[in-house]
Image: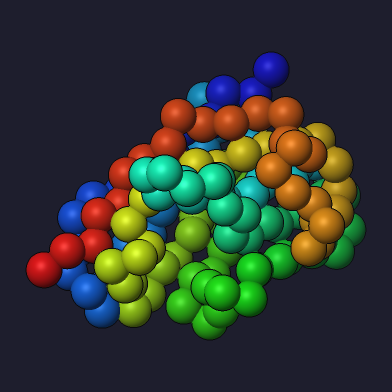
C-alpha cells in the first residue's frame, strides 16, 4: 500500500507559477510510475503527466499530454522521494484539484491512463484568479 501526499496548491494569478509535489508517506518511489491528474468542477479527471522511476537506474519515461506542453513539466528528486509538477504561465482554466497517483510498473506513455493507477493522493487545490 502506498500513501501519497500532495502539496503546493494555492491561489495564483494568471501567468503565475506553482510547483506541486507528491511524496510517499514512507519510503521512496523507486520502481513506480507517478502520474499527475486534475479535476475541475463538473469535469472528468484529466491526465496531465507521468514519469517512470525505474530501479537500478534503468532509463525511465516521461509523458506530458499535449494540452499542457510546454507549460507543465514533471520531474523527480535524486532520492526518488518527491515527484513534482512545475506549472508555469497558469491560466484560469488550470483551476482544479490536482492529484498524484502511483502504480508499480516501469513505463508510462500516452496509453497509460486513469484506470492504470492503483494508488491516489487526496489532491491539492489550485485556483487561478486575479
- Residue farthest front in this picture: 42
Quarter containing the C terminus: bottom left
At x 47% / y 48%, what residue is drawn?
43
User: 93 and 79: which one is in front?
Assistant: 93
Snapshot quadrant of residue 110: bottom right
Image coordinates for residue 108, horizontal then vertical, percent = 80, 56
**Does residue 102 lie above or below 118 as drawn?**
below
Q: Which is more toward the observer, 115 or 59?
A: 115
Q: In which quadrant of the rendered image does the N terminus lie?
A: top right
Q: Which residue is drawn at 88% across and 58% down?
A: 58
Q: Residue at x 75, y 37 (%)?
A: 115
Q: Where is residue 12 in the image (x, y as percent from the top left)?
A: 20, 63
Q: Is residue 91 shown above or below 1?
A: below
State whether residue 75 appears in this view.
no
Residue 74 image-quadrant placement? bottom right
Numbered disc total: 0
| Whether residue 25 is situated above or below residue 67 in the rendered picture | above
Q: Looking at this view, name the residue that lies furthest to the top.
A: 1
In the image, 105: left or right of 37?
A: right
Task: From this view, report whether residue 69 is shown above or below residue 5.
Answer: below
Q: What colour scheme does the image use?
A: rainbow
Residue 108 visible:
yes
Residue 128 horizontal/vertical position (percent): 24, 62
Is 60 or 66 nearer to us in this picture? 66
The residue under the point 85% across, 64% down is: 59
Amino acid at each position: 500500500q502506498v500513501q501519497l501526499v500532495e502539496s503546493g496548491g494555492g491561489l495564483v494569478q494568471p501567468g503565475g507559477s506553482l510547483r506541486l509535489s507528491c511524496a510517499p508517506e514512507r519510503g521512496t518511489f523507486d520502481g513506480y510510475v507517478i502520474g499527475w491528474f486534475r479535476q475541475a468542477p463538473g469535469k472528468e479527471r484529466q491526465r496531465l503527466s507521468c514519469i517512470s522511476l525505474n530501479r537500478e537506474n534503468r532509463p525511465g519515461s516521461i509523458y506530458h499530454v499535449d494540452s499542457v506542453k510546454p507549460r507543465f513539466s514533471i520531474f523527480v528528486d535524486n532520492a526518488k522521494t518527491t515527484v513534482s509538477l512545475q506549472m508555469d504561465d497558469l491560466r484560469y482554466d488550470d483551476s482544479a484539484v490536482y492529484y498524484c497517483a502511483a502504480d508499480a510498473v516501469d513505463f508510462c506513455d500516452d496509453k497509460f491512463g486513469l484506470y492504470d493507477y492503483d494508488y491516489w493522493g487526496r489532491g491539492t487545490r489550485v485556483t487561478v484568479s486575479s
